[in-house]
Image (cartoon, rainbow, N blue to C red):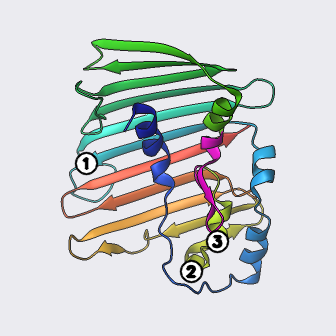
Amino acid sequence: MNMKKLLGLIFFGVSLLPLSSCDFTPPYPADIQAFVDQFNYSNALENHQAGTYVYKAYTARCDNFDETDEKTGTIERTYTYELNDINHAETKETYWGDQIPTYGDKKGVVRFEEILDNTHLTTTTTLDGASTSETKTDVLTENERNYYFQQFFYTNYDDVDGYQGGCYYGDYLKGASTLTNFISINEEEQTLEINFGFEEDVMIDTQEQIYMAWHLKVDKYGMALSYIQKMWSIDRLVYSEFNVTYR
């Protein structure tokens, strides 16, 4: 797996939510259905031409199943983008401990940066405890540049599941009515929230006793504003969250 693909999975992997395996999906209550029906990817793209995404994650040894546990590794990522005539984006990532990704036969990445300015993509990778740094600049085609920006919104699309895998959750939520009991709408803020598993422990693997909880908040276009995911076992915690602001 190349470095860019690996980083893409780290960035957007947190946006994969549990899906129902049932063939039949019951309808939403009328108020939730009306809110979800307004989600449309084209509208989301048109109304989110700039923004900043801040992602943090860590692994820890579990004592209380919360973010105060002793950390064994961290990831932090900031992604800022601007579309229209500017076409500029910046990504900055840092890694520590057991979250340092592999990099071929080298010791791993502690820092990774990308700056996209129109068609020029400059990548700087810092390896081996900040002792080695590699920088390269690629000239992207228009399609490559568009793909780079598209990943902020989604990473995959098909006729069944729609746009998924980035900050656009509109299509996912259209098929998630089995989660109705966990969904609430704030009419004043025009937001929808899902809180799953924070009221009680939800076990997702009985053999290994793995638990999960997650929170998602989206705006009226189906774009994520915040997301928190927590998975834990008897002695291991994986916690991640992201927050997005749009301009």
Residue type, mark 1 in image: Ala
Q: Which residue is mark 1?
A: 60
Q: Nearer the viewer, residue 229 or 117?
A: 117
Q: Is residue 174 above or below residue 120?
A: below
Q: Is residue 34 above or below residue 38?
A: below
Q: Residue furthest left?
A: 235
- Tell me the CA gap for discs 2 and 1: 31 Å
In the image: residue 115, left or right of residue 207: right
Image quarter of residue 71: top left
- Tell me the CA gap for discs 3 and 1: 31 Å
Q: Earlier in the sequence, mark 3 or mark 1?
A: 1
Q: Nearer the viewer, residue 214 or 11?
A: 11
Residue drawn where x is 72% and y is 75% of the image: 32
Magenta region, residue range = 150-166
Q: Which mark is residue 178?
A: 2
> Residue 106: horizontal and vertical position, in percent?
24, 24
In reply to whether residue 165 is colored magenta, the answer given is yes
Secondary structure of the residue carrying tag 1 is strand
> Residue 86: horizontal and vertical position, in percent?
76, 23
Q: Is residue 128 visible?
A: yes
Q: Which residue is mark 3?
A: 184
Residue drawn where x is 76% and y is 82% of the image: 30
Q: Is residue 201 visible?
A: no
Whether the residues at callouts 2 and 3 have beta carbons within 8 Å, the answer is no
In reply to whether residue 235 is colored magenta, the answer given is no
